[in-house]
Image: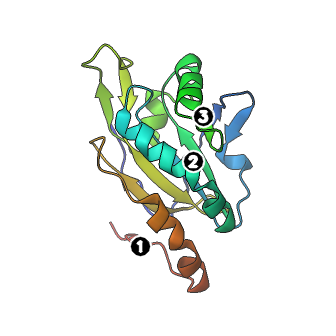
Amino acid sequence: MTQKLMPDSQAPELSLPLVGGGTWALADQDPKNFTMVIFYRGLHCPVCKMYLSKLNELTDMAADAGVNVVAVSMDPEDRATQTKSEWELANLDIAYGATADDVRNWGLYLSTAFKETEIPQFAEPGLFWVRPDGRLYLIDISNMPWSRPDVEFLLSKVKFAMDNSYPARGTTA
């Protein structure tokens, strides 16, 4: 069963291989302001392609805002490598091989393939901001491919959040 994550609580652990080599681990992140973890559906998803392509163009904006970014899927290495190459995501870290347990720990929805182009099971979209101390600040999940927050708008709000010590909201269940 998927769990409901609470803002201002400790983010679940996450450590995955990266396209091109190495490992991305949330515990190793040391951003000025936030680590943005974006779960995407995988190579089969044209909406993910548009979303991550836009994000790829915003990596300087993210860096200027003090935000580290990683895009995560349940795709295996070959499909994640194809995603990075064909979608021209040179500026993004692409992590792959998330498990169903990883996805459930992050409170995301899982879907079962109904098209030949899909892997048997994959995560639906999710976007998270994690503070440098590992606490969740922003949580946005969806059960549909086309419902996602505007990343450019979100990145434009980092300075406001930091300058005003704006607290994580929704901390009362």
In the picture as drawn, the residue positioned furthest to the left comes out as 114
Query: Disc 2 designates what residue?
Result: 56
Classify mark 1: helix, strand or loop: loop
Q: Quadrant of residue 21?
A: top right
**The disc labelled 2 sits on which kind of residue?**
Asn
Q: Residue at x 68, y 41 (%)?
A: 25
Name the residue tied to disc 3. Answer: 95
Residue beneath disc 1: 169
Position in image of residue 168 (x %, y %): 47, 72
Separation of residues labelled 2 and 3 (CA atoms) = 14 Å
Q: Nearer the viewer, residue 62 or 99?
A: 62
Q: Which amino acid, by three-letter code, is at mark 3?
A: Ala
Looking at numbered disc 1 in the image, what kind of residue is underneath it? Arg
Query: Which colour scheme appears in the figure?
Result: rainbow
In what quadrant of the picture does the C terminus appear?
A: bottom left
Q: Residue at x 57, y 83 (%)?
A: 165
Q: Position of residue 72 (x, y in %)?
A: 53, 37
Numbered-mark total:
3
In the rendered structure, which disc, 3 or 1, sits on the residue that comes first in sequence? 3
Q: Residues within 10 Å of mark 1 (few under 14, many from 20)?
A: few
What's the residue at 68%, 67% (across, down)?
A: 64
In the rendered structure, which disc, 2 or 1, sits on the residue that comes first in sequence?
2
Horizontal relation, residue 98 to residue 44: left or right: right
Q: Position of residue 102 (x, y in %)?
A: 49, 35
Residue 95 vs 58, above or below: the answer is above
Query: Secondary structure under badge 3?
Result: strand
Crowdedness of circle 3 by 10 Å Cα count: few (<14), some, many (20+)?
many
Closer to the camera: disc 2 or disc 3? 2
